[in-house]
């Protein structure tokens, strides 16, 4: 499908069809996050996708570097020289969620009904296709962007603590560099997003005491303790939802998202594991909420004992900045859409230390992400390309 010219990767106009073909090629490269990997996932992790991006960007004249963050999992950094020293980063995560629940071939990348279909089509290879196509269009016309553009492909956004974004942040800190503006690619229907909740995860191990199921009084049932934890977390979720005073991002949320335990049908279980997810609003502090939830969980589990760990070793406060900041205002004007906030989390959580302005922006709807059927409208690719043309040349 990609002859290197029609798609805008080495020249030509970035049309909706050519961007669709470029995106289709990317969808056909599996890049499932290892935490989501299963029998249908194909090639493990992001390496093949990173190499593909590196080759395309290098063909357009970018300075390219692959940076192995975890074994077989590199970030890719592609720098396109601009006419000024001002730096703009566009962060596009390379990984996707799993495909075991998807219908048909999750990586067929078919183009029908005015859409591109398949895992990653909207979340979030679409932006990578758009930026590469627009840069190809500019290269063919002999034009440079006004700012120097660093296109960053990051690993591990869909699981693993945003390791790719953390590594890029640390890279900038180690070099003493900042970015005036960072655009984090996610499906926002091309509306600029200036805030979303942070988050933390609690990994909970419940330790009870095993006993014969005919004498349950001799044991401490870890699953029963787990059930009490679920009830306590549900009550906390209701308390949060009923708060009268909340910030710009609304109320925080909490839920039990995983639970497992039990050894046999005739043994009172002595062990249970849970995962509790907490979304942090702009009026909250994740360390305080971690401490609050830990105490709540321990009290609910008694007389069983619990061990509570912070998943990945850290949490994140909310991402939020003034809706009237320059980048937010510019993208709103270019897209013709009102700036907004989002419910989901993104790599923006990692960039507060290294960027003056951060915006989450990209084609397509988050409603199509992570679904059994994933797609993006070609018209959304065209709208995003129009915005990037204006952004890179202003």
Image (cartoon, grey):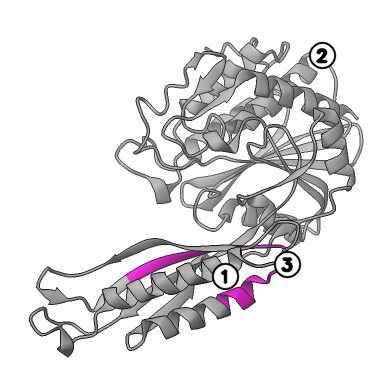
Question: For this rendering, which residue is in front, 196 or 359?
Answer: 196
**First reached walking from the N terminus: tag 3 or tag 1:** 1
- The reply to whether the C-beta atoms of the residues labelled 2 and 3 are less than 8 Å apart is no
Quarter of the image where one finds residue 318? bottom right
- Calculate the distance from the C-alpha at mark 3 to the C-alpha at mark 1: 12 Å
Q: Vertically, is 84 above or below 242?
A: above
Disc 1/disc 2 C-alpha distance (Å): 58 Å
Q: Residues within 10 Å of mark 2 (few under 14, many from 20)?
A: few
Task: Give coordinates of residue 374: x percent, y percent.
Answer: 48, 30
Q: Which residue is mark 3?
A: 245
282 is higher (above) or lower (below) than 231? above
Q: CA distance from mark 2 to mark 3?
A: 53 Å
Residue 328 is tagged as none
**SS state under label 3:** loop
Q: Is residue 222 left or right of residue 212?
A: right
Residue 255 higher or lower than 32, as above or below: below
Question: Depth-wise, is mark 1 or mark 2 nearer the camera?
Answer: 1
First in sequence, mark 2 or 3: give its number. 2
Q: Is residue 389 visible?
A: yes
Q: Is residue 135 visible?
A: no
Residue located 44% across and 74% down the image? 232
What span is colored magenta in the figure? 273-291
Residue at the image point whose x is 64% and y is 51% from the top:
347
Which residue is denoted by mark 2 in the rendering?
141
Q: Residues within 10 Å of mark 1 (few under 14, many from 20)?
A: few
Q: Which residue has dot 1 on it?
A: 239
């Amino acid at each position: 499908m990609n002859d290197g010219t029609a798609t805008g990767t080495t020249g030509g106009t970035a049309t909706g069809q050519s961007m669709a073909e470029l995106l289709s090629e990317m969808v056909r490269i599996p890049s499932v996050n290892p935490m989501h990997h299963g029998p249908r996932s194909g090639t493990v992790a992001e390496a093949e996708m990173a190499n593909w991006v590196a080759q395309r960007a290098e063909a357009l004249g970018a300075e390219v570097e692959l940076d192995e963050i975890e074994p077989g999992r590199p970030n890719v950094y592609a720098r396109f020289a601009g006419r000024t020293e001002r730096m703009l980063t566009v962060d596009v995560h390379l990984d996707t969620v799993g495909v075991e629940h998807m219908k048909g071939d999750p990586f067929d990348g078919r183009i029908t009904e005015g859409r591109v279909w398949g895992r990653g089509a909207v979340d979030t290879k679409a932006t990578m296709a758009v930026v590469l196509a627009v840069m190809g269009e500019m290269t063919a016309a002999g034009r440079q962007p006004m700012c120097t553009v660093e296109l960053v492909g990051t690993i591990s956004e869909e699981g693993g603590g945003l390791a790719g974004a953390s590594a890029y942040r640390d890279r900038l800190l180690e070099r003493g560099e900042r970015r005036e503006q960072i655009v984090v690619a996610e499906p926002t229907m091309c509306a600029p997003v200036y805030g979303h909740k942070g988050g933390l995860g609690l990994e909970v191990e419940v330790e009870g005491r095993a006993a014969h199921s005919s004498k349950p009084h001799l044991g401490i049932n870890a699953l029963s303790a787990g059930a009490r934890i679920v009830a306590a977390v549900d009550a906390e979720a209701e308390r949060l939802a009923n708060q009268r005073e909340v910030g710009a991002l609304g109320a925080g949320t909490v839920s039990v998202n995983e639970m497992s335990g039990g050894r046999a049908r005739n043994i009172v279980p002595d062990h249970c594991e849970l995962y509790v997810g907490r979304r942090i609003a702009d009026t909250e502090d994740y360390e305080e909420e971690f401490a609050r939830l830990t105490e709540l969980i321990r009290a609910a589990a008694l007389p069983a004992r619990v061990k509570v760990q912070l998943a990945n070793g850290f949490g994140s406060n909310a991402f939020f900045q003034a809706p009237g900041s320059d980048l937010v205002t510019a993208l709103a004007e270019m897209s013709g859409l009102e700036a907004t906030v989002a419910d989901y989390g993104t790599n923006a959580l990692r960039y507060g230390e290294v960027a003056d302005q951060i915006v989450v922006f990209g084609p397509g709807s988050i409603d199509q992400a992570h679904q059994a059927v994933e797609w993006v409208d070609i018209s959304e690719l065209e709208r995003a390309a129009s915005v990037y043309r204006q952004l890179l040349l202003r």
